[in-house]
Amino acid sequence: MTTTAEIISIGDELLYGQTLDTNAHWISHKLDEYNIKVFQRTTIGDDADQILNAFATAAERVDIVLITGGLGPTKDDLTKSLLAEYFGVGMVRHEEVLRDITLLFAKASREVTALNAQQADLPANCQKITNPVGTAPGMWFYENNTVFVAMPGVPYEMKSIMTQGILPKLHEMFSKGVLHHHIIKTIGITESSLSDLIEDWEVNLPNHIKLAYLPTKGQVKLRMTGSGDNLNTLKQEIDALKMAIMPKIAKYVYGFGTDSLEGVIGQLLNNNNLTLATAESCTGGYLAHMITSVPGSSRYFKGSVIAYSNEVKITQLGVSTEDLKQQGAVSEEVAKAMAEGVRKELNADIAIATTGIAGPDGGTAEKPVGTVWIAYSDKHKTLAKKFNFSRDRTFIVHWSALAALNMIRLNVGVK
Amino acid sequence: MTTTAEIISIGDELLYGQTLDTNAHWISHKLDEYNIKVFQRTTIGDDADQILNAFATAAERVDIVLITGGLGPTKDDLTKSLLAEYFGVGMVRHEEVLRDITLLFAKASREVTALNAQQADLPANCQKITNPVGTAPGMWFYENNTVFVAMPGVPYEMKSIMTQGILPKLHEMFSKGVLHHHIIKTIGITESSLSDLIEDWEVNLPNHIKLAYLPTKGQVKLRMTGSGDNLNTLKQEIDALKMAIMPKIAKYVYGFGTDSLEGVIGQLLNNNNLTLATAESCTGGYLAHMITSVPGSSRYFKGSVIAYSNEVKITQLGVSTEDLKQQGAVSEEVAKAMAEGVRKELNADIAIATTGIAGPDGGTAEKPVGTVWIAYSDKHKTLAKKFNFSRDRTFIVHWSALAALNMIRLNVGVK
């Protein structure tokens, strides 16, 4: 039997379109990892009748009801009292919760008001789930064969409670045995090409190991989910399956699990004791932004010259006026000269350069919008590659930056 | 009587947490502009029983049911046939839709298969709503006092159909008279401070003009919504109200309607025939990325030097080794030297520089994470301002870039 869940998001600000509901999305993704099927998601306002009605209808159709929002100490504090009403119970004060709140407030030299103290009152039939990062605890109920979970709407509080308190309990209750995931992250290949490459392997996967293709902007993740009795056996099995497929896809695999492409590049540079500089035209700073989004990137990233005008390409990067005139700014020659120029100027071991037409204007028949040259340079070699991206300005910039990072990976990785 | 709506989002990929449902968010926001209250949002999978049930329950509680997803030509094509089933009608082929599809496919040298042609079949009781950017048209039904609208799930197709076909019809049907919005966009002031500033004005607003505070990351939008009989009178009235309040808030107002801060900066520079360069340390390229996200920014943006290392600050921007040693990289002196340096190096009229501690590491008691110096330089003056931002790396970078853009606005705007 499939275990089913419904997610109820509560808050007028969601229905007004002021706040984007990323909570329901994140919870859906997590439950999918745990083999729990989200049957429905319901978003409602801060209205008592509507909330009570949502509790009742959800309990009729699913095994698990997950509620976010409405646990703050102010007027929104509707969820908690309505849960007590729904279950027909009173409130019980949890002294340890009050102690935590008092401690937290003392640090900020604030006094605990009666309103704040109410956060320590929970419905009598609920089990308190610790909130490691905030004052409103999560709540767990189990009545009439249905689990109810209530959590604050603040995303990082909800995620902490879910990860540390709720998901392990759900797994214990609804999964026979253990579950193990392994995520392989690829770049530079489409979902369908990847699927073609690993078709033979995929059809022979054992029944207890499922494969999911998870495409995001410009990348495809492969997720293996295995279920069984013994975690070690499962890990070994999935590891062996991974080893069997890696030779076919290694070229496209940049990492595993929670790895990010920019993080992997950083490790690669750190491990090889190499420094990096970039010269950007069409990416306009976005490539450097991706690189510097990694904490500690100042260890290997020296900086960048964003040469949005030809003048800057000439004066700061030493691109020749002749190349600009004869080949144009979007050309192999200029991309290479930019990479070599910035490597020398910024005294870096490795450099990458982008030049292209991000649009919407500036395209020609010969070089339409989306034409991008990316060059890589180190002390041994300089090379460039042409890309033809489609869609709009935002996508072209994003894909160009990904391709540039991937070019670092492919060239630094290979000796 | 308040007009109410329910949004039904259909798609397994939503429930798996693969696709973030931005459609429901966007529709909520738009309906709010039209004084239509979203009562509930429901997300369900590609399952016939569940979809039919969602249609029926929604029709019981609201005036308008808006459905997205499940209108593609493949297996997902469930919504359309289920709507026909729900209303008990057959399908009718719309020849003009087929003609459009055939034309579109001819351009891409593709043949129209029987499956593709089915997109021209619509339930007999529906009114076709043109899809200006795709092959699946929108559908409008009015049965038993309830409006049903079905649209494709592809965001830009949905938005086109909504904006051009659906919202005007909804307005005509449910609003007595006309509606007029005016949005004032501010930066550099919090929601509560803004509210304090305009309190007297706000309490005296006439009943038919509503004010909404719409805070986004680092900015607050003020939206006036007026309803009445005559659009011109309404426009004049709202214009007069705006004029009455502007003197109090002008300093914080960077634009109106769909203006973006980076777009406004671009216009300001263009109008004054000025060029811009940036020198970035803690923003790591994000500031340049914001500036270059505006199409046509190459007209005024010369480029940037991202000086992530002290070495680059010295060699490329002429920052003095002494200042770096004595004041530290995050200081007024270094920020100013960076701005002046990049202005001269890149031969720009105006320059802006950022240097700060984005974290999570690198903070000290004296200069904690979030300490940021931003400098502005033109041929007449160089000045710098210190900011103390909180939260995490992503926020500090974002707020620093916004503050930098705002500093351009405040200094170029004032002669």
Image: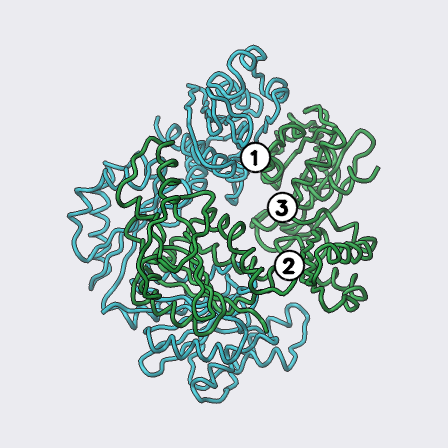
Chain colours: A green, B cyan
Disc 2: CA contacts within 10 A as few (<14), some (14-19) or many (>=20): some
Of the pair B362 and B136, the residue shown nearer to us = B362
- The residue shown at (75%, 51%) is A252
Q: Nearer the viewer, mark 2 or mark 3?
A: 2
Given the image, on which type of amino acid does mark 1 rest?
Gly
Q: Nearer the viewer, mark 2 or mark 1?
A: 2
Compared with B291, B338 (above or below) is above
Please report contact status of discs 3 and 1: CB closer than 8 Å, yes or no. Answer: no
Relative horizontal placement of residue A286, taking residue A83 as reference (left or right): right
Residue B249 visible in this rendered orientation of the protein: yes
Given the image, on which type of amino acid does mark 2 rest?
Leu
Tag shown at residue A357: 3
Residue B160 visible in this rendered orientation of the protein: no
Q: Secondary structure at mark 1?
A: loop
* Disc 2: which residue: A214
- The residue shown at (45%, 76%) is B139
